Image (spheres, grey):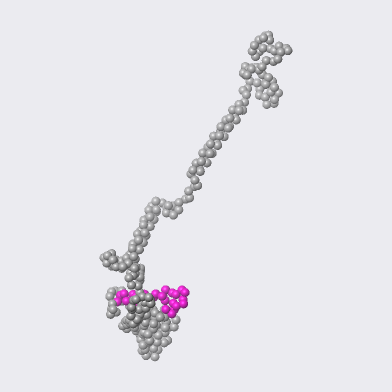
Amino acid sequence: MDAYDKGSNARPVPGEPAAAVPDSLPPEGHETADDHETSDSPEQKPSGEAPARIPQQYGDQQRDDLQYDRQDDQQYVDAALAGPPLPPPTGIAALSLPYQIAAALALAVVAVAACVHVGMVFLHVAPSNTVTKQHGQAIDEWIYPEFEQNWKLFAPNPLQQNIAVQVRADVRAVDGEIRTTRWYDLSALDGAAIDGNLLPSHTQQNELRRAWDFFVATHDNANRPNGLRGALSEKYLRRIVVLRLDREQAGGRGAVVQQVQVRSRTTNVPPPKWSQEQVSDKPIVRVLPWWPVSEADRAAGTRPVESTGTEAAAR
Protein backbone atom coordinates (compact mmCIF):
# COMPACT_ATOMS: atom_id res chain seq x y z
CA MET A 1 0.00 0.00 0.00
CA ASP A 2 1.23 3.49 -0.69
CA ALA A 3 1.36 6.56 1.44
CA TYR A 4 -1.96 7.73 0.11
CA ASP A 5 -3.86 4.82 1.53
CA LYS A 6 -6.38 5.86 4.09
CA GLY A 7 -7.22 4.12 7.28
CA SER A 8 -5.32 2.79 10.18
CA ASN A 9 -3.13 0.53 7.99
CA ALA A 10 -1.63 3.34 5.94
CA ARG A 11 2.14 3.45 6.16
CA PRO A 12 3.73 6.79 6.96
CA VAL A 13 5.93 8.47 4.37
CA PRO A 14 9.44 9.34 5.47
CA GLY A 15 9.81 13.05 6.17
CA GLU A 16 6.14 13.67 6.82
CA PRO A 17 4.52 14.12 10.25
CA ALA A 18 2.71 11.18 11.74
CA ALA A 19 -0.97 11.05 11.32
CA ALA A 20 -3.15 11.77 14.38
CA VAL A 21 -4.39 8.80 16.32
CA PRO A 22 -8.09 8.44 15.86
CA ASP A 23 -10.35 8.65 18.91
CA SER A 24 -11.91 5.32 18.24
CA LEU A 25 -10.38 2.18 19.65
CA PRO A 26 -8.34 0.06 17.25
CA PRO A 27 -9.78 -3.15 15.99
CA GLU A 28 -9.14 -6.30 17.92
CA GLY A 29 -5.77 -7.88 17.22
CA HIS A 30 -3.98 -4.56 16.61
CA GLU A 31 -1.72 -2.84 19.03
CA THR A 32 -1.49 0.84 19.80
CA ALA A 33 1.27 3.07 20.97
CA ASP A 34 -0.03 2.90 24.49
CA ASP A 35 0.16 -0.87 24.40
CA HIS A 36 3.83 -0.67 23.43
CA GLU A 37 4.53 1.82 26.23
CA THR A 38 2.97 -0.37 28.93
CA SER A 39 4.22 -3.69 27.62
CA ASP A 40 7.30 -3.57 29.78
CA SER A 41 5.25 -3.10 33.01
CA PRO A 42 5.39 -6.10 35.35
CA GLU A 43 1.67 -5.90 35.81
CA GLN A 44 0.93 -5.99 32.09
CA LYS A 45 -1.80 -8.53 31.42
CA PRO A 46 -1.28 -10.94 28.55
CA SER A 47 -2.75 -10.03 25.22
CA GLY A 48 -6.26 -11.14 24.57
CA GLU A 49 -7.60 -10.46 28.17
CA ALA A 50 -10.20 -7.81 28.77
CA PRO A 51 -8.97 -4.74 30.66
CA ALA A 52 -9.95 -4.50 34.38
CA ARG A 53 -13.01 -2.41 35.16
CA ILE A 54 -11.41 -0.51 37.99
CA PRO A 55 -13.62 2.57 37.73
CA GLN A 56 -16.67 0.35 37.64
CA GLN A 57 -15.55 -1.53 40.76
CA TYR A 58 -14.99 1.71 42.61
CA GLY A 59 -18.42 2.83 41.56
CA ASP A 60 -20.03 -0.36 42.90
CA GLN A 61 -18.23 0.01 46.22
CA GLN A 62 -19.36 3.62 46.51
CA ARG A 63 -22.96 2.58 45.86
CA ASP A 64 -22.72 -0.15 48.51
CA ASP A 65 -21.22 2.29 51.03
CA LEU A 66 -23.96 4.80 50.22
CA GLN A 67 -26.60 2.11 50.73
CA TYR A 68 -25.08 1.16 54.10
CA ASP A 69 -24.92 4.82 55.14
CA ARG A 70 -28.60 5.24 54.28
CA GLN A 71 -29.50 2.19 56.35
CA ASP A 72 -27.51 3.50 59.34
CA ASP A 73 -29.14 6.92 59.00
CA GLN A 74 -32.59 5.32 58.89
CA GLN A 75 -31.84 3.28 62.02
CA TYR A 76 -30.59 6.40 63.79
CA VAL A 77 -33.71 8.33 62.83
CA ASP A 78 -35.94 5.46 64.03
CA ALA A 79 -34.08 5.31 67.35
CA ALA A 80 -34.37 9.10 67.79
CA LEU A 81 -38.09 9.04 67.11
CA ALA A 82 -38.65 6.09 69.44
CA GLY A 83 -36.96 7.86 72.37
CA PRO A 84 -35.28 6.19 75.35
CA PRO A 85 -36.36 2.64 76.25
CA LEU A 86 -39.35 2.47 78.60
CA PRO A 87 -38.68 1.23 82.17
CA PRO A 88 -40.29 -2.04 83.23
CA PRO A 89 -43.74 -1.65 84.84
CA THR A 90 -43.90 -1.41 88.61
CA GLY A 91 -46.60 -1.53 91.26
CA ILE A 92 -50.02 -2.74 90.22
CA ALA A 93 -49.08 -2.53 86.53
CA ALA A 94 -46.48 -5.26 87.06
CA LEU A 95 -49.15 -7.71 88.23
CA SER A 96 -51.08 -10.03 86.03
CA LEU A 97 -54.61 -9.12 84.98
CA PRO A 98 -56.44 -11.13 87.69
CA TYR A 99 -54.28 -9.63 90.43
CA GLN A 100 -54.76 -6.15 88.99
CA ILE A 101 -58.53 -6.62 89.18
CA ALA A 102 -58.28 -7.87 92.78
CA ALA A 103 -56.07 -4.94 93.77
CA ALA A 104 -58.44 -2.45 92.13
CA LEU A 105 -61.41 -3.95 93.99
CA ALA A 106 -59.53 -3.80 97.30
CA LEU A 107 -58.66 -0.14 96.75
CA ALA A 108 -62.27 0.61 95.86
CA VAL A 109 -63.50 -1.03 99.07
CA VAL A 110 -60.98 0.94 101.16
CA ALA A 111 -61.98 4.19 99.45
CA VAL A 112 -65.70 3.56 100.05
CA ALA A 113 -65.09 2.67 103.71
CA ALA A 114 -63.00 5.82 104.20
CA CYS A 115 -65.73 8.00 102.67
CA VAL A 116 -68.40 6.37 104.85
CA HIS A 117 -66.30 6.87 107.98
CA VAL A 118 -65.62 10.53 107.21
CA GLY A 119 -69.32 11.08 106.56
CA MET A 120 -70.33 9.39 109.82
CA VAL A 121 -67.86 11.44 111.86
CA PHE A 122 -69.04 14.65 110.20
CA LEU A 123 -72.68 13.88 110.97
CA HIS A 124 -71.74 12.96 114.55
CA VAL A 125 -70.01 16.28 115.28
CA ALA A 126 -72.36 18.42 113.18
CA PRO A 127 -75.33 20.25 114.71
CA SER A 128 -78.64 18.43 114.84
CA ASN A 129 -80.21 18.15 111.38
CA THR A 130 -82.69 16.03 109.43
CA VAL A 131 -80.17 13.27 108.69
CA THR A 132 -79.03 12.92 112.30
CA LYS A 133 -82.61 12.87 113.51
CA GLN A 134 -83.60 10.05 111.16
CA HIS A 135 -80.37 8.03 111.33
CA GLY A 136 -79.00 9.02 114.71
CA GLN A 137 -78.97 5.46 116.04
CA ALA A 138 -76.98 4.16 113.05
CA ILE A 139 -74.48 6.99 113.42
CA ASP A 140 -74.03 6.28 117.14
CA GLU A 141 -73.54 2.57 116.47
CA TRP A 142 -70.78 3.41 113.99
CA ILE A 143 -69.04 5.97 116.21
CA TYR A 144 -69.25 4.41 119.68
CA PRO A 145 -67.08 3.35 121.30
CA GLU A 146 -64.02 3.24 119.03
CA PHE A 147 -64.46 6.58 117.21
CA GLU A 148 -66.02 8.71 119.92
CA GLN A 149 -65.61 12.47 119.49
CA ASN A 150 -65.95 14.88 122.39
CA TRP A 151 -66.27 18.09 120.40
CA LYS A 152 -69.02 19.61 118.31
CA LEU A 153 -68.72 21.31 114.97
CA PHE A 154 -70.01 24.91 115.03
CA ALA A 155 -70.78 24.66 118.75
CA PRO A 156 -73.17 27.52 119.58
CA ASN A 157 -71.97 27.75 123.17
CA PRO A 158 -68.37 26.59 123.76
CA LEU A 159 -67.39 25.52 127.24
CA GLN A 160 -66.96 28.58 129.44
CA GLN A 161 -66.75 26.87 132.80
CA ASN A 162 -64.12 25.50 135.13
CA ILE A 163 -65.08 22.06 136.41
CA ALA A 164 -63.19 20.55 139.32
CA VAL A 165 -63.69 16.88 140.17
CA GLN A 166 -63.16 16.09 143.85
CA VAL A 167 -63.32 12.83 145.82
CA ARG A 168 -63.24 11.58 149.38
CA ALA A 169 -63.28 8.06 150.74
CA ASP A 170 -64.10 5.91 153.76
CA VAL A 171 -61.00 3.89 154.55
CA ARG A 172 -60.25 1.20 157.08
CA ALA A 173 -56.99 1.89 158.84
CA VAL A 174 -54.50 -0.71 159.97
CA ASP A 175 -55.99 -0.66 163.49
CA GLY A 176 -59.42 -1.46 162.00
CA GLU A 177 -60.91 2.00 162.51
CA ILE A 178 -63.07 3.43 159.71
CA ARG A 179 -62.13 6.98 158.80
CA THR A 180 -63.43 9.49 156.25
CA THR A 181 -60.72 11.36 154.40
CA ARG A 182 -60.76 14.96 153.33
CA TRP A 183 -61.81 16.08 149.85
CA TYR A 184 -59.05 15.63 147.27
CA ASP A 185 -59.23 18.03 144.32
CA LEU A 186 -58.12 15.69 141.56
CA SER A 187 -58.50 18.33 138.81
CA ALA A 188 -56.20 20.69 140.72
CA LEU A 189 -53.61 17.91 141.06
CA ASP A 190 -53.71 17.33 137.29
CA GLY A 191 -53.39 21.06 136.67
CA ALA A 192 -50.34 21.28 138.92
CA ALA A 193 -48.71 18.40 137.05
CA ILE A 194 -49.38 20.09 133.68
CA ASP A 195 -48.31 23.60 134.73
CA GLY A 196 -44.77 24.24 133.52
CA ASN A 197 -44.55 20.86 131.79
CA LEU A 198 -43.61 21.25 128.13
CA LEU A 199 -44.73 17.70 127.29
CA PRO A 200 -47.63 16.77 129.60
CA SER A 201 -49.05 13.29 129.24
CA HIS A 202 -52.42 12.57 127.70
CA THR A 203 -53.52 10.99 130.99
CA GLN A 204 -52.83 14.16 132.95
CA GLN A 205 -54.72 16.30 130.48
CA ASN A 206 -57.74 14.21 129.52
CA GLU A 207 -58.30 11.05 131.57
CA LEU A 208 -60.24 12.57 134.47
CA ARG A 209 -61.99 15.21 132.37
CA ARG A 210 -63.17 12.67 129.80
CA ALA A 211 -64.34 10.28 132.51
CA TRP A 212 -66.44 13.01 134.12
CA ASP A 213 -67.91 14.12 130.79
CA PHE A 214 -68.76 10.49 130.06
CA PHE A 215 -70.56 10.17 133.38
CA VAL A 216 -72.55 13.39 133.00
CA ALA A 217 -73.62 12.49 129.45
CA THR A 218 -75.00 9.11 130.57
CA HIS A 219 -76.78 10.23 133.78
CA ASP A 220 -79.67 12.56 134.51
CA ASN A 221 -79.68 15.38 137.04
CA ALA A 222 -80.60 12.91 139.78
CA ASN A 223 -77.45 10.89 138.99
CA ARG A 224 -79.47 7.98 137.61
CA PRO A 225 -78.13 6.19 134.51
CA ASN A 226 -80.20 6.73 131.38
CA GLY A 227 -78.87 3.77 129.40
CA LEU A 228 -76.60 0.77 129.36
CA ARG A 229 -73.54 2.98 129.09
CA GLY A 230 -74.40 4.63 132.41
CA ALA A 231 -73.13 1.68 134.45
CA LEU A 232 -69.97 1.57 132.35
CA SER A 233 -69.24 5.25 132.91
CA GLU A 234 -69.81 4.86 136.65
CA LYS A 235 -67.39 1.93 136.87
CA TYR A 236 -64.80 3.81 134.81
CA LEU A 237 -64.95 6.92 137.02
CA ARG A 238 -64.89 4.88 140.22
CA ARG A 239 -61.72 3.04 139.27
CA ILE A 240 -59.97 6.26 138.28
CA VAL A 241 -60.66 7.91 141.66
CA VAL A 242 -59.53 4.77 143.54
CA LEU A 243 -56.27 4.90 141.60
CA ARG A 244 -55.79 8.58 142.43
CA LEU A 245 -56.52 7.99 146.14
CA ASP A 246 -53.91 5.26 146.13
CA ARG A 247 -51.34 7.69 144.71
CA GLU A 248 -52.16 10.26 147.40
CA GLN A 249 -51.97 7.60 150.18
CA ALA A 250 -55.46 8.47 151.39
CA GLY A 251 -55.96 7.33 155.01
CA GLY A 252 -52.28 6.55 155.52
CA ARG A 253 -50.10 3.58 154.70
CA GLY A 254 -51.93 0.26 154.87
CA ALA A 255 -55.40 1.82 154.73
CA VAL A 256 -58.05 0.11 152.61
CA VAL A 257 -60.58 2.10 150.63
CA GLN A 258 -64.10 0.90 151.45
CA GLN A 259 -66.24 3.38 149.53
CA VAL A 260 -65.81 6.65 147.67
CA GLN A 261 -67.89 9.74 147.01
CA VAL A 262 -67.35 12.06 144.04
CA ARG A 263 -68.51 15.61 143.58
CA SER A 264 -67.97 18.35 141.02
CA ARG A 265 -67.55 22.05 141.62
CA THR A 266 -68.40 24.17 138.57
CA THR A 267 -67.67 27.89 138.30
CA ASN A 268 -68.26 30.17 135.33
CA VAL A 269 -65.33 31.80 133.59
CA PRO A 270 -65.58 35.59 134.09
CA PRO A 271 -66.33 37.44 130.83
CA PRO A 272 -63.83 40.04 129.56
CA LYS A 273 -64.12 43.61 130.80
CA TRP A 274 -65.33 44.94 127.47
CA SER A 275 -68.23 42.43 127.39
CA GLN A 276 -71.69 43.31 128.63
CA GLU A 277 -72.44 39.71 129.53
CA GLN A 278 -73.39 38.99 133.12
CA VAL A 279 -72.68 35.57 134.63
CA SER A 280 -73.00 34.20 138.12
CA ASP A 281 -69.82 33.70 140.10
CA LYS A 282 -71.47 31.30 142.53
CA PRO A 283 -70.09 27.74 142.23
CA ILE A 284 -72.45 24.88 141.46
CA VAL A 285 -71.77 21.68 143.37
CA ARG A 286 -72.97 18.28 142.23
CA VAL A 287 -72.54 15.49 144.78
CA LEU A 288 -72.80 11.83 143.83
CA PRO A 289 -73.88 9.06 146.22
CA TRP A 290 -71.38 6.83 147.99
CA TRP A 291 -70.08 4.01 145.82
CA PRO A 292 -68.83 0.80 147.45
CA VAL A 293 -65.42 -0.30 146.19
CA SER A 294 -65.08 -3.91 145.04
CA GLU A 295 -61.94 -6.00 144.80
CA ALA A 296 -61.88 -5.40 141.04
CA ASP A 297 -61.95 -1.63 141.67
CA ARG A 298 -59.12 -1.93 144.16
CA ALA A 299 -57.08 -3.95 141.70
CA ALA A 300 -57.02 -0.92 139.42
CA GLY A 301 -54.97 1.07 141.94
CA THR A 302 -54.11 -1.06 144.93
CA ARG A 303 -52.35 -4.30 145.69
CA PRO A 304 -53.35 -7.09 148.10
CA VAL A 305 -51.65 -7.51 151.50
CA GLU A 306 -51.76 -10.31 154.01
CA SER A 307 -54.07 -8.79 156.66
CA THR A 308 -56.16 -6.09 155.04
CA GLY A 309 -56.36 -7.35 151.48
CA THR A 310 -55.15 -4.09 149.91
CA GLU A 311 -52.67 -1.42 150.69
CA ALA A 312 -52.42 2.15 149.57
CA ALA A 313 -49.00 2.06 148.00
CA ALA A 314 -46.94 5.20 147.62
CA ARG A 315 -46.14 5.87 143.96
Residue 223, can we see it?
A: yes
Please provide percent x and percent y for residue 38.
Answer: 69, 23
Residue 266: image quadrant is bottom left
Q: Is residue 175 above or below residue 216?
A: below
The image quarter in which residue 230 lies:
bottom left
Q: Is residue 263 visible?
A: no
Q: Tell me the chief SS of the magenta region.
A: helix
Residue 243 colored magenta? no
Q: Quadrant of the N terminus?
A: top right
Which residue in the rendered view is the most extreme toward the right? 15
Q: Position of residue 146 (x, y in %)?
A: 35, 69
Q: Is residue 32 above or below residue 282?
A: above
Percent x, y for residue 140? 31, 68
Please provide percent x and percent y for residue 276: 34, 76
Quadrant of the frame with the C terminus:
bottom left
Between 129 and 24, which is closer to the camera in this rendering?
129
Nearer to me, 54 or 211: 211
Residue 193 colored magenta?
Answer: yes
Q: Give, as a single range, the part of the protein colored magenta.
A: 191-219
Q: Is residue 98 left or right of residue 85?
A: left
For the point 37% across and 53% down, which residue is it? 101
How many numbered discs? Answer: 0
